[in-house]
Image (cartoon, helix red, strand yellow):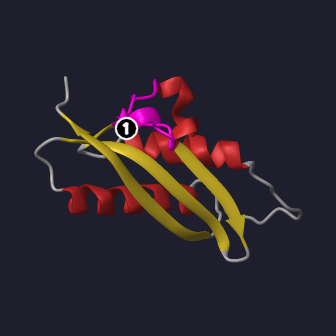
Amino acid sequence: MAENIPGKLHVANDVLADMAGHAALECYGVVGMVAPSAADGIAKILPPSRLRRGITVRTTDAGVHVDLYVVIEYGTNISAVSQNLVDAVSFALKEQARVAVDGIEVHVMDVKVRK
């Protein structure tokens, strides 16, 4: 947009979680998202329609803080995939939603072979 429009825009945390989830699934090495409270250590991959269950977004004074709960593909570098996740989600939130990002944490819940 070339011009500024007066007023304030409020984006719900659920919308930010959806944006973060879609950005995360586009990253190489990510098999899927899982719920943060994986019962008895079994990480069940969530379908794309329920991605926000694998993401928590909370608002802080400095912006939004995002926790991603992911399953990584076996054989990929976990550190590199995690950094790509942070970069992709940060870019999506800053450029598409125009929100300040306080922090992004990646929680690798499982490692699986992609089918």
**What residue span does the magenta drawing correspond to?**
32-47
Residue drawn where x is 45% and y is 28% of the image:
46
Instruction: Please determine whether, in this image, residue 46 is positioned above or below residue 63.
Output: above
> Looking at the rendering, which quadrant does residue 86 occupy?
bottom left
User: 72 and 100: which one is in front?
Assistant: 72
Instruction: Please determine whether, in this image, residue 75 is positioned above or below residue 2.
Output: above
User: 36 and 103: which one is in front?
Assistant: 36
User: 86 and 99: which one is in front?
Assistant: 86
Q: Position of residue 44 (x, y in %)?
A: 40, 28
Residue 1 appears anywhere in the view = no
Check disc 1 and report the residue beneath it. 41
> Looking at the rendering, which quadrant does residue 59 occupy?
bottom right
- Looking at the image, residue 40 sits to the left or right of residue 59; the answer is left
Furthest residue in direction bottom, as rendered: 62
Q: From the image, which quarter does the C terminus lie in?
A: top left
- Looking at the image, residue 114 sits to the left or right of residue 64; the answer is left
Q: Main secondary structure of the magenta part?
A: loop
**Label 1 environment density (alpha carbons within 10 Å; few <14, some 14–19, many ≥20):** few
Q: Position of residue 95 (x, y in %)?
A: 55, 60
Q: Amino acid at mark 1?
A: Gly
Q: Position of residue 55 (x, y in %)?
A: 54, 46
The number of callouts visible is 1
Residue 47 appears anywhere in the view = yes
Residue 43 on the magenta segment: yes
Q: From the image, which quarter does the N terminus lie in?
A: bottom right
Residue drawn where x is 67% and y is 70% of the image:
63
